[in-house]
Image: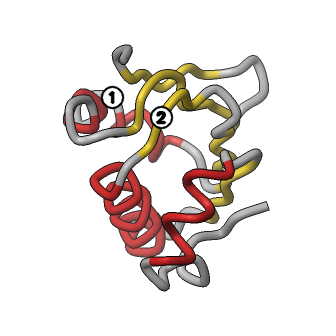
Amino acid sequence: MSALNIEFADSPGVCRLVGSLTLDYVMDLEAQQSALWQHKQLTLDLADLQQSDMAGLAWLVRLVGEARLRGVSMRFTNPPDTLLKLAKISDVDKLLPLE
């Protein structure tokens, strides 16, 4: 496993999650996530996730809720198959703005 970070791209409002979106690392994002709310439109690329679990999925669902409260339009791109399967099994796939 590896740590989890938010990396910001050169384009405003575009960033990617890199590492393991798992219980062991999801709390690492708490300090970093405040930087996400500087944009009114946010694209979070998930292509560089190495692992994901239910805790990571729950964090994404919570992130979507917080984005709505802040008036931020959010979308997730390139979700890994494992994350898609977890979302479907948990019946939260419709809550996530997946592309």
Is residue 42 or residue 84 the one in the foreground?
84
Left or right: residue 32 versus residue 95 is left
Count neighbours of disc 1 (C-alpha within 10 A) and say few if under 14, some if 14 to 19, many if 20 or more: few
* Mark number, residue 23: none
Q: Amino acid at mark 2?
A: Gln
Would residue 47 be found to the left or right of residue 6 on screen? right
Quadrant showing the C terminus: bottom right
Label 1 sits on what residue type?
Answer: Gln
Reading the image, the residue beneath label 2 is: 51
Q: Viewer-proximal residue, 10 or 54? A: 54
Mark 1 = which residue?
A: 32
Q: Position of residue 45 (x, y in %)?
A: 68, 39
Residue at 42%, 29% (x, y): give it: 20
- Residue 60 located left or right of residue 45: left
**SS for dot 2:** strand
Q: From what the image shows, is residue 32 above or below residue 81?
A: above
Considering depth in this image, is 83 or 6 the residue closer to the camera?
Answer: 83
Q: Is residue 2 above or below residue 24?
A: above
Q: Position of residue 36 (x, y in %)?
A: 47, 40
Say which residue appears at 63% left-offset and 31% top-offset: 15
Distance between the alpha carbons at the discs numbered 1 and 2: 19 Å
Residue 93 appears anywhere in the view: yes
> At numbered mark 1, what does the secondary structure look like: helix, strand or loop?
loop
Residue at (38, 74) in percent of width and height: 69
Residue 91 on image: x %, y %: 48, 85
**Residue 14 is drawn in which quadrant?**
top right
- Considering depth in this image, is 23 or 74 the residue closer to the camera? 23
Mark 1 / mark 2, whichever is N-terminal: 1
Q: Between tags 1 and 2, which lies in front?
A: 2
Q: Residues within 10 Å of mark 2 (few under 14, many from 20)?
A: some
